[in-house]
Image: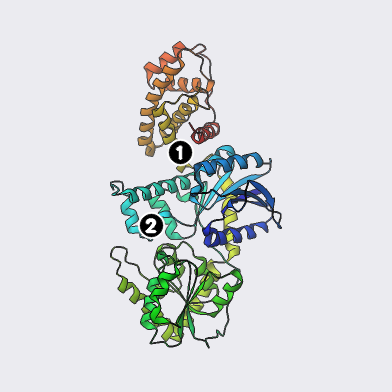
Amino acid sequence: MMHIFIFNNASRAANYGIGTYVRLLSDGLLGRSGVKVSFVDLFSDVKEYSIADDERGCRHYQVPALFSGMENEPYCRNVFYFLARHIKAEDDERLVFHFNYFQHKPLASLLKGQYFDCRIVFTVHYLGWCFELKGNKTRFRELIAEEYQPKDDKERGLLASVENEKEFLHLADEVIVLSKDTQQILAEGYGVSSDKMHLVYNGLGDGLCFDKDKNVGNGRIILFVGRLDEIKGLNYLIHAFRHIADKYADIRLVVAGDGDFQLYLSQCRDLQGRVSFLGKVSSSEVEDVYRSAYIGVMPSFHEQCSYTAIEMMRHKIPLIGTDTTGLAEMLDATPELRVSIDEDNMMDEEFTERLVSCLNLLLSDEDAYQRAADAVGKLYEARYKVSDMVHATCGVMESSWDRPDYTVSPDYLKHIDSRMIQLINQCPDIDTDFYGMGGIGVYLWKRVLDLCDRKEGDFQASLILEHLIYYMDWVQDVVGSSPLPVELWAMIRSMGQHGFYKACVNALLVRQPGSDTLFQMPSDRVIIQNALKICNCKI
């Protein structure tokens, strides 16, 4: 039995793409044999921690919202204590913790330490820098370059955000990406191993949903669906529409979504009667909106795998979009409708003209329109059905247990190294036992032995060895002639056999009673699980 815990959020994002993803994925997983689904609802509209079952029999662990700020480390730690009291893994149960938000990294780390055989699965719905930099990958590469020095607090904050994202992605046992573009960014910019990344496109429905004889008696509707945020590029669409409004008397622009209406209403004063703002459309009304649309436009600067775009494809609505991030490959079937964004020198007028050109093509050439409609419909059926999404996601989770002798993602070991080195530099007042000073040294010495077997680990091994010298001095100062835990003894004997820091190691061996006793180093599994717990401990 595979028990999947899906971590959701009651914030604004839950009402958009991520919420749709969680709902569709969970609905699909519930129909599969050998799968149990539970939810951890963070920022819930409840007054206290509670547990409730829904009408489908799914358990919901409900956590109230904070009065201020996003989910921070103390919030995540409290959630962990709540879950640890109630989640008990049965003998035949494989636990999967499926995360969708980067701010939950502290919670994921605590769960991995507590349920060591679990799998942490993370689906990448967004990258923080894409919002700050409007999806500009050229600028992102400049910022993360090794020699780059941040110029101000904004850039320092952005780089800190990238590091936080990187740590979560390295911790995850499996990473699901929604586009090839993101897959490449994570490999090159975040150092995520390719063998744990899985491309699974978002899915919606399991068949086309369109009218063969679309009624355009009330005019041809150009549809924009999305938040009224700058990153969605609505202002460019309004300008493009103004360029062609007189040429095509039957066209109207319909905008569905909430946000800063006043900003865009002021841009439409000279287009009265031609532009309609619907606000946020309810689920019962959204079908009519798509059925009435003639052309869809997404002039976005950043998308992952947009449900809006999939909905348009499903309704065979020709879609004009940009070549940014994940949106570019959603236009694979209609490259002529892909509008280029010049990341080095963005010229508003040129970008608007490209939108106008695509709109003219679809509005003036019926054959081109029909070819585009057929092409997006075929792409939907080949790539974006919900059954394919659920099947692939479940496959990622099931296959995660196929790796022999797996403990944690190799990507994450350097992060554990850094925390252990930090503790050595701090020399905190902690016990010498395995869940303390002993565990720090045993883990780092084991890492050195493993890294020395691989040439690419020379630099990291040298860094650790340098700090192990400081560590052994720390041990010598603290223990004196007191008995040492067996794990620490095994490490010191191993160091002696390898000729490491002979003066200190030999002094400890001579001073300690029972130094001729043979002790075995703990297994890799025990060492790493203990190291995770030390990392998670507030020292």
Q: Which residue is mark 2?
A: 132
**Is residue 180 shown above or below 148?**
below
Residue depicted at 52% across the width and 12% down the height: 514
Instruction: State the residue position of label 1.
Output: 413
> On screen, 328 above or below 295?
above
| Residue 421, placed above or below residue 21 | above
Q: Residue at x 39, y 17 (%)?
A: 504
- Residue drawn at x 32%, y 51% as measured from the top left: 143
Cα separation, mark 1 vs mark 2, equals 30 Å
Q: Secondary structure at mark 1?
A: helix
Element carrying mark 2: helix
Query: How are the residues colored?
Result: rainbow
Question: Where's residue 339, x and y in %?
Answer: 38, 72
Q: How many marks?
A: 2
Is 27 left, or right, of 244 in this rendering? right
The answer to whether marks 1 and 2 mark residues whose Cβ atoms lie closer than 8 Å is: no
